[in-house]
Amino acid sequence: MMVGVVLAAGASRRMGRPKPLVRSSGKSFAAHGIRHLWSGCNEVVVVLGSNAGTVRSEVEAEFQRMVGTGELGRDLRSAHRHGAAGLEVNFAPNPKWKSGMYGSVRFGLKRALELEPEGVLVLPVDHPAVRPETVIGLAELLRASLEACRSARERHRFRYALVPRYRRRRGHPVALSAALARDIAGDSGAENLSDAMRRNARLLGFLDVEDPGVVKNVNTPTD
């Protein structure tokens, strides 16, 4: 099982309004992130912080509207193809979100690991243009790498990170084996997720994709 984590806890100061609720192509950034991760993950954890109550209620209402219009049929068929029973999302308010993005990464990984996944995909909410096929490719490659381990013990110790790359530029979401996710969740000394991967991964792989969305983060209204 793969679990996705959407990082949506920041104050969005440069955007001027809650970034998870900013809309692109008619949907909020949060809805885009959740649906992207559903394409390759069994469940999704959304880490909230600033304006947590408002963000959660508005995103839940948005998904209720999509259920009513039948828009999630494709998402459900995609979920069934990779073994998910349905479309699951868990909102997780981080009480220490003001400590910064890396604190929310660790918080989200801890919540994801409670679901006992084989791997975790981490996506910042400000990457709404990531393509579902990129998420599917990352999840499938991570799963294949884990299956290549010779034993359950080796899989349990396999500290592997997989990063999408567009025209030699690294992007998001990043895929982490469960062993690496555990180490990062417990690493309070790293500066950020990239630093934590360097400190803890035993193997770092890249997936070259034709998806500019992996490197396009939207931080201001003019991005």
Image (cartoon, grey):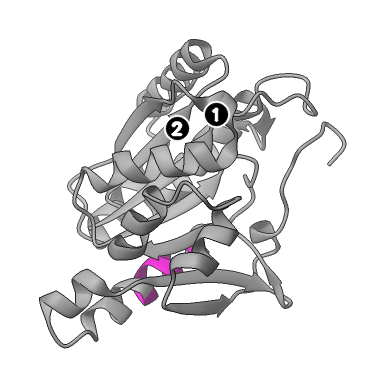
Q: Which quadrant is the C terminus positioned in?
A: top right
Q: Name the residue rendered at 44%, 20% in the picture.
A: 95
Answer left or right for 47 relative to 89. Answer: right
Say whether marks 2 and 1 touch (CB < 8 Å): yes
Q: Which mark is residue 128?
A: none
Residue for badge 2:
47
Q: Which residues are magenta?
A: 135-141
For the question of whether residue 52 can be seen, the reply is yes
Asked whether residue 136 is drawn in magenta, I would say yes
Residue 10 location (% of width, % of height)? 61, 29
Q: Could you tell me what secondary structure mostly forms the magenta stretch?
A: helix
Return the residue found at the far front.
189
Q: SS for tag 1?
A: loop
For the question of whether residue 40 can be seen, the reply is no
Residue 202 location (% of width, % of height)? 41, 77
Question: Upstream in the sequence, badge 2 or badge 1?
Answer: 1
Return the residue found at the far right.
222
Q: Which mark is residue 9?
A: 1
Asked whether residue 54 is drawn in magenta, I would say no
Q: SS for tag 2?
A: strand
Q: Name the residue rendered at 37%, 46% in the picture.
A: 109
Q: Please state which of residues 36 and 124 is positioned toward the viewer in this rendering.
A: 124
Quick check: 44 above or below 192? above
Q: Name the residue rendered at 47%, 51% in the picture.
A: 122
Residue 108 location (% of width, % of height)? 40, 40
